[in-house]
């Protein structure tokens, strides 16, 4: 059910509610499959009986209807994938966060100057350096996506005994790749310690007719630190990756990732055609 907090200008909305707004902004009647969503918005007071949009929505819908930059943070952890994001409009910036098991995301206005902090928060990136783990002898691992899939398949059959699970994963990875020690054991330890994997993607219009996209993908391996996936190279298009695709991960640090997140954002001169 959608809701809002007028004191802080924040809203809880599902994608289907955003779709209703899009039709109403275009002076269209939402299709039948969105009637229930329309009624929910009317019950909440965000849409009037004749389809009038609440003035409270002005900044949010202006940004959503004509964004300068769209940012998506895809995070996969214990509860499965979640999608967060930021919409940068001409006059307002809105951050939205998903929540496990819930359809709605919370949309909150933020200051543009806090954008890097906001993106770091979404992926739980802390700039304090993580203590170096015992895996200090390896800084890069290169194998295939099929080998990684085999390792995860073995881990999904994990027993309650950690040593048994580790042995099964090592056997699976050894049989599916040409990795040798210490990279073989290191990759198994990293997959076993994964807190989450995340990817941040930014997109904007750029030059007329040419959209610009930047993206990074990272493994958060807990006390084993952060590892950036440099291959397959981002941004990845659907259908580009197969079992034989190269997988390459490189040890990195929160400080370097912070700088890379900042570099994902376009400069003013990149936003050609927009009055940024």
Image: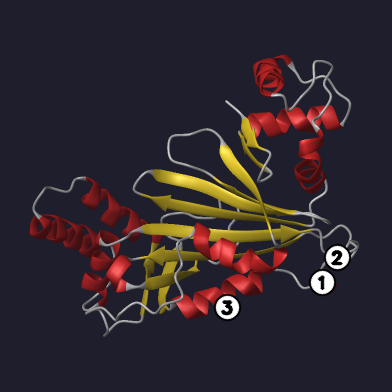
Left or right for 182, reference 256:
left
Tell me the distance, in whole angstroms, between the alpha carbons under discs 1 and 3.
Answer: 18 Å
The answer to the question of whether label 2 and label 1 lie on touching residues, with beta carbons closer than 8 A, is: yes
Q: Quadrant of the N terminus?
A: top right
Would you place residue 115 above or below residue 38 in this image? Answer: below
Q: Which residue is mark 1?
A: 268
Q: Which label was assigned to residue 276?
A: 2
Q: Which residue is mark 3?
A: 259
Q: Identify the mark nearer the N-term, 1 or 3.
A: 3
Q: Which mark is on residue 161?
A: none
Residue 240 in the image: state x and y as whole percent: 55, 54
- Residue at screen point 67% across, 43% down: 7
Contact, mark 3 vs mark 2 (Cβ under 8 Å) = no
Sequence-first tag of 3 and 2: 3
Q: Residues within 10 Å of mark 1 (few under 14, many from 20)?
A: few
Quarter of the image for the C terminus: give it.
bottom right
Q: Is residue 200 left or right of residue 276?
A: left
Front one among 173 and 74: 74
Q: Callout 3: helix, strand or loop?
A: helix
Secondary element under disc 2, as helix, strand or loop, is loop
Quarter location, residue 64: top right
Q: CA distance from mark 2 to mark 1?
A: 6 Å
In percent of the image, x 57 and y 67: which residue is there? 117
């Amino acid at each position: 059910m959608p809701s809002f907090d007028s004191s802080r200008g924040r809203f809880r909305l599902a994608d289907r509610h955003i779709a209703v707004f899009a039709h109403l902004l275009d002076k269209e009647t939402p299709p039948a499959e969105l009637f229930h969503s329309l009624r929910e918005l009317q019950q909440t007071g965000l849409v009037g009986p004749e389809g009038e949009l609440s003035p409270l929505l002005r900044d949010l819908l202006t940004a959503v209807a004509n964004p300068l930059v769209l940012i998506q943070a895809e995070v996969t952890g214990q509860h499965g994938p979640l999608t967060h994001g930021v919409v940068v409009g001409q006059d307002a910036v809105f951050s939205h966060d998903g929540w496990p098991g819930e359809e709605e995301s919370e949309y909150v206005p933020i200051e543009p100057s806090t954008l890097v902090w906001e993106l770091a928060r979404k992926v739980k990136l802390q700039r304090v350096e993580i203590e170096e783990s015992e895996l200090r002898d390896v800084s890069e691992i290169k194998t295939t996506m099929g080998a990684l899939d085999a390792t995860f398949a073995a881990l999904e059959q994990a027993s309650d005994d950690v040593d048994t699970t580790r042995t099964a994963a090592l056997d699976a990875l050894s049989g599916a790749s040409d990795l040798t020690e210490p990279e073989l054991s290191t990759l198994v330890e990293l997959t076993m310690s994964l807190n989450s994997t995340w990817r941040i993607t930014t997109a904007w219009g750029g030059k007329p007719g040419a959209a610009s996209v930047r993206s990074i993908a990272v493994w958060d391996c807990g006390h084993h630190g952060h590892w950036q996936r440099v291959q397959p190279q981002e941004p990845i298009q659907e259908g580009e990756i197969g079992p034989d695709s190269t997988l390459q991960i490189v040890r990195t640090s929160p400080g370097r990732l912070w700088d890379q997140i900042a570099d994902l954002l376009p400069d003013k001169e990149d936003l050609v055609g927009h009055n940024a």
